[in-house]
């Protein structure tokens, strides 16, 4: 898991070639002005979901993990709290892995929480169970899905 300022995103291009493409996409597009929905950058290999989340507490947020995709999450409004637990410590499955949706959900709350403000991002790899979307009011966010190499 990585948390940083968007202005530093290009520092992480060695982790995956798609990160440079995302940085270019962000520079050329007003994410906050994008319509809610799926925006294809490179088909199923790289796309962005613009989402409008609802208010959610820590207790309501479910830990999730993915196998095929890396998540790069960017709050577009306000501050979002996100939870984190190493996947290897998630033992109680709430919803088994769904291959089509590339997600499994786990019981319990995250081990740690952090805030991601507008102008920041959180990068979650398959080994990172995460509980995103914790806000008192909800908000708009961008979720880039990067297919693992």
Image (cartoon, rainbow, N blue to C red):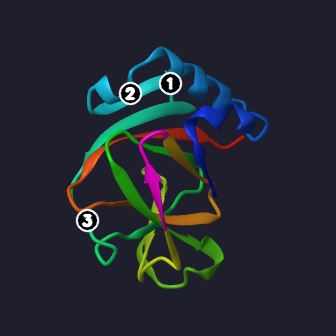
Q: Earlier in the sequence, mark 2 or mark 3?
A: 2
Front one among 89 and 148: 89
Marks 2 and 3 sit apart, C-alpha to C-alpha, by 22 Å
Of callouts 1 and 2, which one flags the residue occurring earlier in the amino acid sequence? 1
Measuring 30% from the left and 41% from the top, which residue is drawn there?
Answer: 51
Secondary structure under tag 3 reads loop
Q: Nearer the viewer, residue 60 or 105?
A: 60
State the image coordinates of residue 97 (x, y, percent, origin top left).
48, 65
* Numbered range of the magenta stretch: 114-119
Instruction: Give the answer, above or below, for where 94 lies relative to 52.
Output: below
- Which secondary structure lies at badge 1? helix
Location of mark 2 (residue) = 31
Q: CA distance from mark 3 to mark 1?
A: 27 Å
Circle 3 is placed at which residue position? 56
Q: Are marks 1 and 2 in contact (CB under 8 Å)?
A: yes
* Residue receiving disc 1: 26
Quarter holding the C terminus is top right
Q: Residue at x 65, y 36 (%)?
A: 8
């Amino acid at each position: 898991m990585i948390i940083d300022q968007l202005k530093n995103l290009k520092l992480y291009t060695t982790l995956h070639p798609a990160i440079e493409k995302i940085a270019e996409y962000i520079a050329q597009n007003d994410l906050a002005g994008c319509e809610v929905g799926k925006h294809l950058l490179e088909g199923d290999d790289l796309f962005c979901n613009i989402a409008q989340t609802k208010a959610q507490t820590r207790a309501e947020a479910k830990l999730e993990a993915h196998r095929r995709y890396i998540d790069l999450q960017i709050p577009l409004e306000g501050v979002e709290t996100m939870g984190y637990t190493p996947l290897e410590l998630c033992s109680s499955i709430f919803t088994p892995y769904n291959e089509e949706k590339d997600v499994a959900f786990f019981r319990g709350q995250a081990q740690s929480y952090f805030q991601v403000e507008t102008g920041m991002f959180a990068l979650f790899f398959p080994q990172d169970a995460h509980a995103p979307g914790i806000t008192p009011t909800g908000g708009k966010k961008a979720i880039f899905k990067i297919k693992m190499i």
